Structure formats: C-alpha cells, structure tokens
Amino acid sequence: MMKHYDYLIVGAGLFGAVFAHEMKENGKSCMVVEKREQIGGNIFTYDTRGIQVHKYGAHIFHTANQQVWEYINRFAEFNHYINSPIAIYQGKVYNLPFNMNTFHQLWGIKTPAEARHRIADQIKDLHIGDPANLEEQALSLAGTDIYEKLIKGYTEKQWGRACQELPAFIIRRLPLRFTYDNNYFNDPYQGIPKQGYTAIITQLLKDIPVVTGVDYHHFIKNQDSFTFGKTLYTGMIDEFFEFRLGRLEYRSLRFETEDMPDCDNWQGNAVVNYTEKKIPYTRIIEHKHFYYGQGEGTVITREYPQDYQEGNEPYYPINDDNNMMRYHQYRELADKQKNILFGGRLGQYRYYDMDKVIESALQLVAQENRETPIESYFPSNNC
C-alpha cells in the first residue's frame, strides 16, 4: 500500500525545517526531500577539529524580535558573538559599520561634530538631487571618501556591474554611526549556535523522514510509494514551472576554503572585507573567531561573487524592475496551483535574514492551521 503524508516539504533549509517541525507538532505527517546531499540549506555547518565551518558563507543570527529569539533557542544553545567586521583598502584597516572609529581612521578626527562636518562638506560639493543610480545614492549619503574606499569596489564585485549601472534602491540608506561602536547589527539579540546550525536543523527535523540528494521533479516522476496532500516548495519558483516565463536572475558565490591545521590565528577577526575591486574576493571568513577562537588550527574561506549559472547556487535575487515583473507573473501561476505552497528566499524571490525566514515559515504554518494564531508558536505564549 502507498503511504500517505499530509505534506511534502521540498528543501531542508531553515524555512522548510521550521514548517515541517511545526506541522508535525500540529499532528500532520510530513516528508522532506532535499536536492543537496545534506540538510541545512545555506546555513549548513560541519565540524573540523572543533571548529564549526560555515560551508556556504557566514551566518550570524540577529533579531529584534524577542519571540523569534526565544523560539530558535529552543533548538540550540547560542553564544554571544557580536559581528564586528573590518575592511581592508590598499593595505589600511577600517572598522565597520561606518562609525567614529572609521571616521578617525579616514580623517584623523575625534568628535561626531567633526565627522558630520566632513561628510556634509563632501555631499554638498557633489550637487546630487534625486539619485539616479547606486553611485549617486551612496555619494549623497556618505560622501566621496567612504564611497571610493569602502563601498564602490566591494559593491561592483558583489553585483558584477558598475555602480552607475545599479539601481539606487540597493542602498536605500547607509548606517553612519557617530559613536565608537563596531557592532554591525543594532538588534538586541545576536549570536551563533555553539554546535553549529546543522544541529538546529537536525532537531527541527527529528523523527521526520528526509530524503537527500534528490531533485523534486525527478522524485515526483519516479516514485510510486507515497501520496501527498500538499507540497511546500522552497526551491526556485521559476524552476518549479520549468522556466516557462524565462529565468529569474541571481548573483551567486564561489567559496574557496583552506584548512590550516598548523596555524592558530590567521587574520585575527571572523570577517574581513576587501573593498578594492582588483582583489577578486569580497571577504575572508575565519570560522573559529565566530566561536571565540575555539578549536585546533584554523579554517578560512574566501568568497568570490559570480554570475549565477545552472549548477551554481542562487544566493542573491536581482530585484530590479524586469525581474520583479517576471516574478509576479510566476506568482500568479503559483496562486493557481492546487495544494502547492511556496516559501523561502527562492520560492518567494527575496533576500531573507534568518529571523525573517522563521517568522515567514511560522506565518505559513498559522495560515495552514487557520484557527491557530502565530503567537502560539512562540515559547513565551505557551506557559
């Protein structure tokens, strides 16, 4: 006899895992299929000599939502890591985000008034009205020195285009902090799970059948052992429809990881950005510093932005007008699908921080369990 599941979840990343866990808690049977050979999506981590390596780039959990913070802490113990990256431009080191330390490193000034005056003078001399592109937007917010040294090269590497060719909305605002504060995020809740992110996904998917290394379309066409009530698809929405309306555009990343068992501390910080365009990578991650130097030796990863091609991983949606018009056409097709749900950054063609992924997944759970408010999924409301 064929086994029936209430939900087939396509994708074992954070969105799919949260949805599967909560639907199981609500008495629904779930099965998960994952294209990659391992669970976790882009937050997959693995252990090397006591160092949790972030295989697909640095992931730092941060949120202003206390309920989301309490929710994720049900599945792992977090450390108190605070993201304080640095940037290197022509051999000189600058603190990020842009703050009084950065301004002192740029100009030798010491007070917020001096910094504001220097930036205002540079902006005034540019005579930019309504910014027409990313370059004008950044210049109108931060002035010439910050733009030329810390924004221009990094951004052009990240997006593969000149800043004059990029839309202004990519940089709607720039955080200029007139305090000596290197904390990159303003969120009150920050940290990284001590045992890595894969441990969280493992807990979320406990007792739920998971099949890895299987493409969704191949799985559906070639299996005859299961039936499903509904499907949650967290892959690329255009791929689900076999690209019938054309492909949505993404930027991708290539990771070059180097294991250094005989080196205890390679760069002295978890995240170092390289903002010169001639340096092909955007940043180097030294993973052990996410965990306060724990582990033997060290592991570093260089991140190289690249165009998305089939076979690469789609990381950043290019949400310009043409792509958004195409996405909305796909969304109209999706809305007509019976018993098919779409979620996550690929299914919804948007960039999500991890806390927003959790919120969105729980909202979909609440929608599926129509009489259950989303608040009930947070621990502080389950006393």
Image (spheres, rainbow, N blue to C red):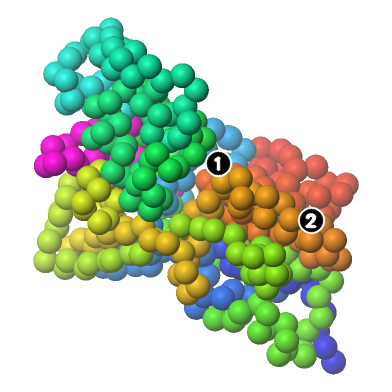
**Residue 149 picture quarter:** top left
Quarter of the figure with residue 11: bottom right
Taking the spot 25% from the left edge, 14% from the top edge, the residue there is 118
Name the residue at 34% across, 40% down: 83
Magenta span: 78-97
> How far across and down, in percent of the image, does residue 375 sit?
73, 40
Q: Quadrant of residue 294?
A: bottom left
Q: Amino acid at mark 1?
A: Trp
Q: Is residue 205 left or right of residue 143?
A: right
Q: Is residue 197 visible?
A: no
Q: Residue at x 50, y 78 (%)?
A: 37
Query: Percent from the top left, x then y, of residue 130?
Result: 50, 23
Extreme-top residue of the structure = 113
- Whether residue 90 appears in magenta in the rendering, the answer is yes
- Badge 2: how crowded within 10 Å, few (<14), some, or many (20+)? few
Task: Give percent across and percent down for residue 363.
Answer: 73, 47
Question: Which residue does the image show at 28% across and 60% down from the upper left?
Answer: 301
Q: Is residue 334 visible?
A: yes
Nearer to us in this view, 86 or 170: 170
Q: Is residue 62 magenta?
A: no
Q: Which residue is mark 1?
A: 69
Q: Left of 177 or right of it: where is 28?
A: right
Q: Which residue in the structure is indicated by mark 2?
A: 332
- Tell me the crowding category of disc 1: few under 14, some 14 to 19, or many 20 or more residues within 10 angstroms, Cα based: many
Instruction: Name the kind of residue labelled 2 in the image.
Output: Glu
Q: Quadrant of the N terminus?
A: bottom right
- Judging from the image, what secondary structure is the residue with disc 2 in? helix
